[in-house]
Image: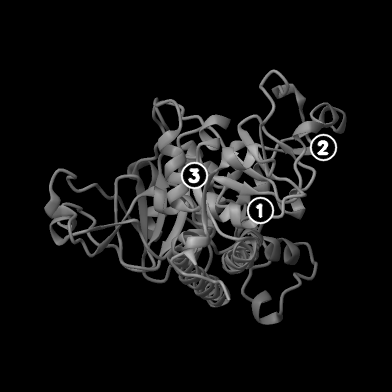
Amino acid sequence: MVDEWQNCTIGELCDAGLLDLQTGPFGTQLHAHDYVEEGVPVVPTEAIRNRQIDHSVLPKISPIKAEELVRHRLELGDILFARRGVQATGHIGCVREAEDGFLCGTGAIRLRVRRDSSSVNPDFLSHVLANPASVKWFKFHAIGATMPNLNEGIIRSFSFKIPPLPEQLAIAHILSTLDDKIDLNRQMNETLVALVRALFKSWFVDFDPVRAKAEGRDSGLPKILDDLFPDSFEDSEQGEIPRGWQVESVGDLADVVGGTTPSTKEPANWDGGTHAWATPKDLSELSVPVLLDTERRITDAGLSQIGSGLLPTGTVLLSSRAPIGYLAVAEIPVAINQGFIAMMPKMGISSLFLLLWASVAHEEIVSRANGSTFLEISKANFRPIPVVTPSAYVMKKLEQLARPFYERIVEIARESCTLAALRDTLLPKLLSGEISLKK
């Protein structure tokens, strides 16, 4: 029953000896020159989000330096707060087996449930702290307008309801099971995306099948695929390209358009809107390049203010500024704001070809951007970018091979959206005691 739940604060649990709170090392203890290529990973603010720790952005320090900071060594079950930054502040990450022994970074605060605690479960506590309502509370109470900061005092003042341990364990099990499945789906999709990108790079960037045939080697492809590729190269303005292929511009392959933001001062543009309207933020947290939904909707009146209108399913979206390079294929009809370049493939051009080309051509795209405050690539600068384009047969075969992978990626992404919606519905009800799991 809810009556058995108790109100408490993080500070009260710390004072009772159940929790331990510690800020990461000061900047004077850890300098830029301490970071090395190989060593002990350090968890910075940007690696902390959604109860996860992103291994792709972990700097490292030498084992000798790590020994100097041994009091900041992380243990299984620790909870890390991102304590500074407009976007990151208030988010948490959980230390799992993979991060056991890493170090807390200077931009983090570590919360640890003491090993001898018999009344607080770290998984339950992590779900409480990762609750969007909790993150919102921390962001609101952070100090500083330009660079919000959390400190131990703010975290200690956070209050919540805590049930008896058996109910904590049951709640944590349900929520963690959903999170684990969502994370497994993410890993599966990232693997599928990597496979398709590797295929694209081999065929259309490195020209591996053509190179092998030109050198008299086995391409490693089945004959039906091997026969699609020429056995020699020819010169072009882009250097050597497979014989019979062409160098075309992006503008030759797709209709390139941009968007705008309907007036936010006019409620008629937004209230009760039914049309999906995307900003780069909708792409920023995607683990795979598939757009299934957007944060906001616009009305017919709002849509009428966007010259490109409602873009069809299959449109490839590229964020054109701050930063350049977020990518996704729209799986819904969508209107876009001015932060995008949209590519609608022309007849015979695969949307997956455009998506994969943009993912490997990032440096080329950025090189054509300009701007003093932040880089932005205009449609005028984007359309002429050259693309080595294969024969129609090879383009068609790429579509045939990659499309089933992509459809599986979309299927998995939809399942994760359903699971996340279920989790988000259950989470506040479970954490408030509205749904009781007591037997």
The single residue placed furthest to the right in the displayed view is 64
- Location of residue 297 in the rendering, given as x and y in whole percent from the top left corner: 26, 59
Q: Give 385 or 334, whichever is nearer the viewer.
A: 334
The residue depicted at 41 percent of the width and 71 percent of the height is 348
User: Which corner quadrant of the image does residue 195 belong to?
Assistant: bottom right
Q: Are marks 1 and 2 in contact (CB under 8 Å)?
A: no
Tell me which numbered mark, 1 or 2, is placed earlier along the sequence. Answer: 2
The 10 Å Cα crowd at callout 3, few under 14, some 14 to 19, many 20 or more, is some
The answer for how far apart the CA atoms under marks 3 and 1 are is: 16 Å
Q: Residue beneath label 1, please?
A: 122
Q: Residue beneath label 3, please?
A: 159
Which residue type does callout 2 highlight?
Gly
- Location of residue 173 in the rendering, given as x and y in whole percent from the top left corner: 62, 67
Q: Is mark 1 on a helix, strand or loop?
A: helix
Which residue type does callout 3 highlight?
Ser
Q: What element carries label 2?
A: loop
